[in-house]
Image (cartoon, grey):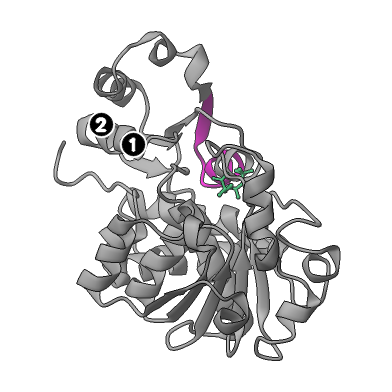
């Protein structure tokens, strides 16, 4: 891999100033778009390959539209349609795609496969979700929080639900952007040792617990996600242990009065969140969805060395 290739693999892989640069690039382009102002097309003539091993609505459409708005285009591929599905290695796939396209965005459950792709690609690789993390989502969430409430530094975010990829990216963001993250999960669905060790090693301001009420007290933002992520086994037991972690009006009432509610979507209404909360005045879930477009345009522009 050439040293100058800028991959976007995880929030904790990059210094805060680079992450801030991406958010600023995205915010500037968003403002111009809203004002119907012409903006330059930094990705003119560039092509993004999008590989999806799993379904997607937001990631797929926002990257495709984002590339068009940046002057480039995208190609949508599914793992099953590619020789990848017949055993061609990730490394060879990376080498071949790098000869055709200017960047690769991939959604693949196996995080090591993402790292392997990045190691062998000579073009930027973007993590579009793995079992381990979902950094594009949390970049959009940071943008959303700051649009509504100003700098996230020193604020408190609460997570209630299971340990999953979105939580991992929130944890990475807490460490990089210096905000408190209170986590409440059932004991059996708590963050794994590798995450607990990382929190210890970095001194990230993250409190792990099992009590959702304790987690949301004093929070400026309450976040949850589906109880069954892609790759998880469905089951009555999982739903039963997660029931007390539902975000409903009672739980929201324990957070700060003006706390935001966030969810990456798709939501399972009546499970991890009630209609009253997700459709209520504190919910910013559709701003988050919209900001996938703007934040990712910032990420794409950054991959091609744009500076805010
Ligand atoms: N939040 C998110 O990544 O949505 P999709 O699965 O629809 O891309
Ligand atoms: N945690 C969820 C996020 C979906 C965007 C999943 O991995 O399925």
Q: Give the residue drawn at x 60%, y 78%.
A: 221
**Foreground pick, 102 / 187:** 187
Q: For ligand 1, which image quadrant applies?
A: top right
Residue 5 horizontal/vertical position (percent)? 23, 44
Task: State which tag comes first along the sequence, 1 or 2.
Answer: 1
Pick whichever, 125 or 87, lies toward us: 87
Asked whether disc 1 touches disc 2, contact meaning CB atoms under 8 Å apart, the reply is no
Image point (60%, 60%), residue name? 291
Near-viewer residue (160 or 190): 190
Residue picked out by circle 1: 114
Q: Is residue 152 left or right of residue 283?
A: left
Q: Gap in Å between the C-alphas at discs 1 and 2?
A: 10 Å
Residue 58 placed where, x, y %?
63, 45
Give, as a single range, the part of the protein colored magenta.
64-76
Residue that carries the numbered disc 2 in the rendered image: 121
Q: Is residue 141 above or below residue 107?
A: below
Q: Is residue 41 visible?
A: yes
Give above or below for 271 relative to 95.
below
The kind of secondary structure element at disc 1 is: helix
């Amino acid at each position: 891999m050439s040293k100058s290739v800028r991959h976007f693999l995880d929030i904790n892989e990059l210094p805060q100033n680079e992450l801030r640069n991406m958010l600023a690039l995205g915010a500037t382009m968003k403002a111009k778009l809203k004002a119907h102002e012409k903006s330059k097309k930094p990705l003119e003539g560039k092509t993004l390959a999008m590989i999806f091993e799993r379904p997607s609505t937001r990631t797929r459409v926002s990257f495709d539209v984002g590339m068009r708005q940046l002057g480039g285009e995208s190609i949508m591929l599914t793992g099953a349609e590619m020789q990848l599905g017949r055993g061609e290695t990730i490394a060879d796939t990376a080498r071949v795609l790098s000869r055709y396209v200017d960047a690769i965005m991939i959604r693949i459950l196996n995080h090591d496969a993402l790292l392997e792709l990045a190691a062998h690609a000579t073009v930027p690789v973007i993590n579009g979700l793995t079992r381990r993390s979902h950094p594009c989502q949390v970049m959009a969430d940071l943008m959303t929080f700051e649009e509504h409430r100003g700098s996230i530094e020193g604020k408190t975010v609460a997570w209630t639900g299971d340990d999953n990829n979105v939580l991992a990216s929130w944890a990475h963001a807490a460490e990089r952007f210096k905000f408190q993250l209170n986590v409440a999960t059932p004991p059996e669905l708590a963050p794994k040792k590798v995450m607990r060790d990382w929190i210890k090693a970095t001194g990230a301001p993250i409190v792990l617990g099992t009590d959702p009420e304790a987690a949301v007290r004093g929070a400026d933002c309450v976040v949850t996600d589906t109880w069954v992520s892609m790759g998880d086994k469905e089951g009555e037991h999982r739903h039963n242990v997660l029931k007390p972690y539902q975000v409903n009006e009672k739980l929201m009432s324990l957070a700060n009065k003006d706390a935001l509610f966030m969810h990456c979507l798709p939501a399972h209404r009546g499970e991890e969140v009630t209609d009253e909360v997700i459709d209520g005045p504190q919910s910013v879930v559709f701003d988050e969805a919209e900001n996938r477009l703007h934040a990712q345009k910032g990420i794409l522009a950054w991959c091609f060395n744009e500076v805010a």
